[in-house]
């Protein structure tokens, strides 16, 4: 069976910095290629660095500057998605990652599996999903994503995962917390700062100040950083900028990941990354948090006071338990197997069995 993934072209695959969906696509593709049960290809930006299977026509939007010109970005995105749909006649399944493809009239000659990673409580997202063509099979990336819009014609639910070997396990921690995420209010960095200050602890902040996808909010996000975060920066509260793979060393060394989210995270990939590094997660009971973070690997709380107390107890969580949870439940091997079932159901074709890669 031949499957082609359609990734966003906001950034490259793999991303140099931010890019959660791009990481999802890259790791799933890498596992599928290694496993060998199917042929896997990826429609992505032309400046991507995939060793095999890349199909590309337009550059990443981030290569155009920060922020990219809005009209140019929209034109390139439309060209990317339309070309992918028209070009994929040689595959059995087109696996689209993100609802953006629906804006450009998918007209592929093959079945489309569309994984939804976004907040399905938004009216514009619901309208797009409700109007999805009959040939598009919708897959939710968590039960939370599906539950917020149960009226959508869902075909399956596949909880995300990571490739554990990509994430360095560190059993002995240093004396700091870490926050990883965009520096906008809903991600809660200002609350992570409050937790660290309350405990007299060190905090390392990793994230984007400029959100290229929403240039119209650039001024508001800059004001948020200036007013809520910058005044606290110093020896204890450090801002390290937007990091790529370098972020993992800081995450692996941390006492805990502080994730005081103020919105319903559809999955929370950084939760899985942190636990894969043996680092417990402390987060709010929003979105898919309880699906991703079990009691043995972190704390899911309801108030800021509870978060402060949980962060103080982070040392009671065994790093090996965090890693074990990811290997057993949030492993891309499980994700790939569930998608193989989706592909088979969509096409009516079965794939040859093979032993899992070592």
Image: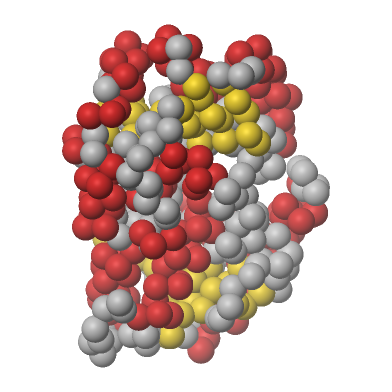
Q: Position of residue 67 (x, y in %)?
A: 76, 43
- Residue 266 visible, this angle: no
Name the side, left or right, on which 259 lies relative to 278.
Answer: right
Q: Residue at x 39, y 73 (%)?
A: 31
Q: Is residue 38 above or below residue 58?
A: below
Q: Is residue 214 above or below residue 94?
A: above
Q: Residue at x 27, y 22 (%)?
A: 313
Q: Position of residue 330 (x, y in %)?
A: 29, 55
Q: Quadrant of the N terminus?
A: bottom left
Q: Is residue 96 above or below residue 152?
A: below
Quarter of image, res 214: top right
Q: Position of residue 53 (x, y in %)?
A: 55, 81
Q: Residue at x 23, y 39 (%)?
A: 318
Q: Nearer the viewer, residue 242 or 246?
A: 246
Name the side, left or right, on which 44 lies relative to 324.
Answer: right
Q: Residue at x 21, y 57 (%)?
A: 328
Name the side, left or right, on which 119 lies relative to 67.
Answer: left
Q: Is residue 199 above or below residue 40?
A: above
Q: Position of residue 120 (x, y in %)?
A: 40, 42
Q: How many badges with numbers are in the image?
A: 0
Q: Quadrant of the C terminus?
A: bottom left
């Amino acid at each position: 069976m031949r499957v082609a993934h359609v990734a966003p072209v906001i950034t490259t695959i793999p991303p140099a910095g931010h890019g959660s969906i791009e990481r999802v696509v890259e790791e799933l593709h890498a596992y599928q290629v290694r496993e060998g049960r199917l042929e896997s290809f990826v429609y992505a930006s032309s400046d991507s660095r995939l060793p095999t299977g890349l199909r590309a026509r337009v550059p990443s939007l981030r290569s155009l500057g920060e922020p990219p010109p809005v009209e140019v970005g929209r034109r390139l995105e439309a060209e990317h998605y339309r070309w992918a749909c028209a070009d994929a006649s040689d595959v059995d399944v087109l696996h689209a990652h993100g609802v953006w493809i629906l804006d450009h009239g998918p007209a592929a000659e093959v079945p489309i599996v569309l994984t939804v990673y976004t907040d399905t409580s938004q009216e514009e997202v619901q309208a797009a999903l409700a109007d999805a063509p009959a040939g598009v099979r919708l897959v939710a990336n968590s039960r939370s994503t599906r539950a917020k819009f149960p009226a959508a014609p869902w075909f399956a639910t596949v909880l995300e995962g990571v490739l554990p070997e990509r994430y360095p396990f560190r059993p002995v921690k240093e004396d700091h917390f870490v926050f990883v995420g965009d520096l906008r209010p809903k991600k809660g960095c200002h609350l992570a700062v409050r937790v660290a200050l309350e405990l007299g602890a060190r905090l390392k902040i990793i994230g984007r100040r400029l959100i290229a996808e929403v240039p119209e909010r650039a001024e508001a996000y800059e004001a948020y950083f200036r007013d809520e975060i910058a005044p606290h920066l110093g020896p204890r509260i450090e801002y390290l900028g937007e990091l790529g793979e370098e972020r993992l060393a800081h995450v692996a060394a941390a006492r805990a990941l502080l994730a005081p989210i103020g919105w319903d995270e559809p999955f929370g990939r950084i939760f899985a990354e942190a636990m894969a590094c043996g680092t417990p997660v402390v987060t709010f009971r929003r979105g898919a948090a309880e699906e991703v973070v079990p009691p043995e690997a972190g704390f899911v709380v309801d108030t800021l006071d509870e978060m402060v107390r949980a962060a103080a107890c982070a040392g009671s969580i065994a790093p090996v338990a965090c890693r074990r949870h990811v290997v057993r439940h949030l492993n891309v091997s499980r994700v790939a197997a569930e998608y193989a079932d989706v592909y088979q159901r969509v096409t009516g074709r079965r794939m040859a069995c093979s032993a899992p890669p070592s």
